[in-house]
Image (tube, helix red, strand yellow):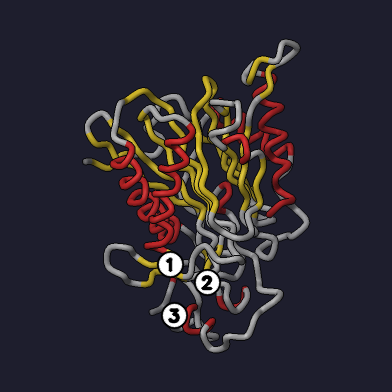
Amino acid sequence: MKTISVTDFDNIKIGQVENREAGTGCTVFIAEKGMSAGVDIRGGGPASRETPLLNPLMAAQQIHAVVLGGGSAFGLGAANGVMEFLEAHDIGFDVGVTKVPLVVQSDIFDLTVGDPFTRPDVTMGYNAAKQAFDMPNYKDGNYGAGCGATVGKAKGMETCMKTGIGSYAIECGALKIGAVVVVNALGDIYDYKTGQKIAGLLNEDKTAFVDTVEVMAQTIDVIDNKFTGNTTIAVVMTNAAFDKAQLCKIAGMAQNGYARSIRPVHTTADGDSIYAVSVGDVQADMDLVGTLAADVVSEAIKCAVYSAESDYGYVAAKDLSF
């Protein structure tokens, strides 16, 4: 196996736009010829759009775009801009009078980072789709949906850290598999190979990490209004040929990457979601691809941590003093 770029996949284009001042953005994955897709949602508070399309029982066998965004549920309107762009380019499901682009979306909660009243909207979604077509511009770090991402928020925003969007991809013979992850978790982030904590909850003077689970375990009292400004979202892509049901399984196996790298994970205060998409016709074993999917997700999480820049008053891993 060798490492490749997440942009080295045929039949899929990635564009992203962010509003740095407002601390939000979106990242769009477009397959103009359509792509099979599945999803696995394990967090208790997802902000999502059209994910029922990916249920194997639903009629649609392909979609045309996946949007990862900020703005929580407010940001789901970005998909309307993506649809507008795709319809203008004659991309979508043919219904006779027009073509309806099938677009799914998941968002992180970043409203407490910059301007809470500026969110991804129709214009931002349109511009991200246009960027994907005209000049694909994917970058790791404080870009696109990762612009306002943070982690380690069990005690609120005062002691959390800045993260972002990250990617990792590999090639194994003719098989390619990669992941793009927006890391915005309630919990702490670990290097899954070493067990070392690399980001998360800080002490008050930001000179050391604090263990999120230990903080949570200080009381067993029920917390009715738990802080829910979280959610880690991802797209796993492969050039292997799979249908919706198989991709739902691969997305579920890819969640193991979250579980190895984020603690706690899949809480009621997170909306952890993974899309898995097929953009090729390579024949490959589903269990192998699912296993590798978990690996590239964990590596993309590390990339999101180490690529992030300190901003909005939140320190990134590269600028820690300890």
Q: Residue at x 55, y 64 (%)?
A: 150
Residue 15 found in image quarter = top right
Q: Quadrant of the C terminus?
A: bottom left
Q: Secondary structure at mark 2?
A: loop
Give the residue pinned by disc 2. Answer: 152
Kind of residue sitting beneath label 2:
Gly
Q: Residue at x 71, y 33 (%)?
A: 81
Q: Considering only order in the chain, which callout, 2 or 3, is on the residue closer to the N terminus?
A: 2
Q: Are marks 2 and 1 in contact (CB under 8 Å)?
A: yes
Residue 195 found in image quarter = bottom left
Give the residue pinned by disc 3. Answer: 209
* Residue farthest to the top, as pictured: 96
- Dot 3: within a 10 Å radius of its alpha carbon, few (fewer than 14), some, or many (20 or more) residues? some
Kind of residue sitting beneath label 1:
Ile
Residue 46's tag is none
Residue 189's tag is 1
